[in-house]
Image: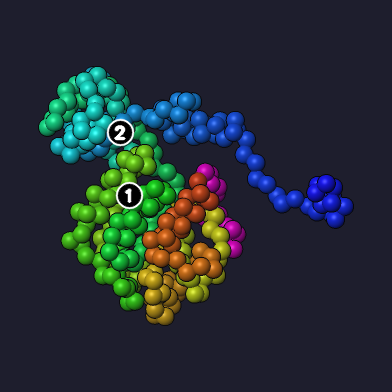
Amino acid sequence: MLDAQRHEAGYAPPHILTIDAQAEATTVTNHEVRENRPPQHADGDHALPRFYAPSLPTPNHADPVEIELDPEEARHAVKARRLQPGSPVELIDGLGHRSLAAILHADGRRVTARIEQTLTHPEPSPRITVASALPKGSRTEDLIDMLVQTGASAWVPLDTEHAVVRPDERRRSRWERRALAGLKQSRRLHRLEIKRVTHPDDLAGWTQPVRLLADAAHGVHKTAKTHAQEIAVAIGPEGGWSQRERSLLLDAGWLSWSLGDSVMRVETAAAVASALLRYLNTGSSDAPADDATASTLL
């Protein structure tokens, strides 16, 4: 009865997005093949346990190589993952190398593995650098974690005129640990590069083909699909850019960019920017080099 009344009134149902489960599964499989990743099992089993090993052998090594995990990774392998001799694992160095290995020895203090094969994976294109002011407290570590998850290549802590929190290089080791944890959790192969603290004045000298100034108050461009191999985006403090900083960067060729009508926290804006740029531009690097900015910065 209700359907008949709706039909007589000219009711049009809202558009419903339908996802083809089979097509989606095929896409994931193809993506894993392109990345040289071992495909996930159809029954939902997780991929091999992954551990960080900064000194992996070269990809062309002919014979198996033995390697010892550092103490923190060894504790995680034994205490949390409960691995035993013979367990298959993956080792990564954060530089695009991934080794297939098996545990040889495992106890509470020492874990060794035999590497059978090492593969090299190119860094995803485009390379996305996010420069941002720091939020308060532990939210800086949340910012780093979200940048790792959303595919940013590098993070530059900014010391801006309206900053609430001043970047402190003494916290770098803490930032690096959070980036490493995110690397393993997100199953990325390239570690987020954390650059030295810098100032907006220094950004004026950056040369990436596309440089976006995220600006809640004055943002102009709404989208950012480009064929550039490198993209930079700057996120100001929650107090906003100063007029001097804004004018300086716009005069230096940065494009004013809007992330929407909402005023976001610093870490949210950084994650949204990174995710949008990665989503919009992955797979678009085969365009002519002279079409770097194209006409899709609208």
Magenta residues span 283-298
Tell me the crowding category of disc 2: few under 14, some 14 to 19, or many 20 or more residues within 10 angstroms, Cα based. many
User: What residue do we see at 25% from left, 66% from top?
Assistant: 167
Q: Pick the quarter of the image with the C terminus.
A: bottom right
Q: Nearer the viewer, residue 64 or 89?
A: 89
Q: Secondary structure at mark 1?
A: loop
Q: Main secondary structure of the magenta part?
A: loop
Res. 226 visible in picture: yes
Q: Nearer the viewer, mark 1 or mark 2?
A: 2
User: What residue do we see at 87% from left, 52% from top?
Assistant: 8
What kind of colouring is applied to the model shown? rainbow
Measuring from the top left, give residue 197's x and y in whole percent.
Answer: 26, 64
Q: Nearer the viewer, residue 59 or 112?
A: 112
Tell whether position 291 is magenta: yes
Tell me the crowding category of disc 1: few under 14, some 14 to 19, or many 20 or more residues within 10 angstroms, Cα based. many
Q: Is residue 264 above or below residue 8?
A: below
Measuring from the top left, give residue 246's x and y in whole percent.
Answer: 43, 75
